[in-house]
Amino acid sequence: MSAEIRHQKIKEVLSQWNPLGEEAAFVEDLNDYDTEVLDILSMCSMRGESASRANIIRDVLNDAFGLCLTAEECDVAAVEILQIEKRYPV
């Protein structure tokens, strides 16, 4: 159950931030960043707790959407995601 809650909370973080901006309306299968949340969680699991969440988020979103985000631009989302991971461990 906590895995589902964690997934949903992280989707909310990305949806509220909406790094795609207005372009999100043109992505057919965006589904509130569902796939990207799975990728972020998978990479976090593989890289461990010491890995920079901002770098992981940057890498996933840049690869998925051809963005040019910096780690600094992902910092706020990274802090929120790390808090969610700690609150809802799997």
Image: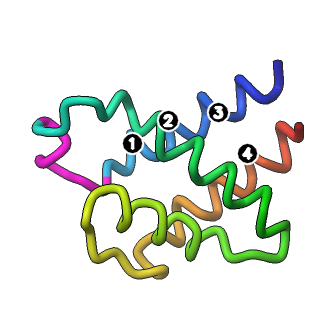
**Numbered tag placed on residue 16 in the rendering:** 1
Q: Quadrant of residue 45?
A: bottom right
The overriding secondary structure of the stretch rendered in magenta is: helix
* Residue in front for this viewpoint, 18 or 4: 4
Q: Residue at x 83, y 76 (%)?
A: 50
In screen coordinates, is 29 left or right of 36?
left
Q: Earlier in the sequence, mark 1 or mark 3?
A: 3
**Numbered tag placed on residue 12 in the rendering:** 2
Q: Quadrant of residue 53?
A: bottom right
Q: Quadrant of residue 66?
A: bottom left
As shown in the figure, which amino acid type bears the numbered disc 4? Ile
Q: Dividing the image into 4 quarters, which one contains the N terminus?
A: top right
In screen coordinates, is 21 left or right of 52?
left
Whether tag 1 and tag 4 are in contact, CB under 8 A, the answer is: no
In screen coordinates, is 63 left or right of 5?
left
State the separation of the CA atoms marked 1 and 2: 6 Å
Q: Is residue 26 magenta?
A: no
Residue 70 is situated, as x and y percent measured from the top left of the image, at 40, 81
Whether tag 1 and tag 2 are in contact, CB under 8 A, the answer is: yes
State the separation of the CA atoms marked 2 and 4: 11 Å
In screen coordinates, is 63 left or right of 80?
left
Q: Earlier in the sequence, mark 1 or mark 4?
A: 1
Q: Determine crowd level at label 1: few under 14, some 14-19, many 20+ residues with C-alpha closer than 10 A.
A: few
Mark 1 vs mark 3, foreground winner is 3
Residue 29 against residue 67 in the figure, above or below: above
Secondary structure type for disc 1: helix
Q: Residue at x 38, y 50 (%)?
A: 17
Q: Determine crowd level at label 3: few under 14, some 14-19, many 20+ residues with C-alpha closer than 10 A.
A: some
Q: Residues in magenta? A: 19-25
Residue 79 is situated, as x and y percent measured from the top left of the image, at 64, 63
**Numbered tag placed on residue 7 in the rendering:** 3
Residue 90 against residue 70 in the figure, above or below: above
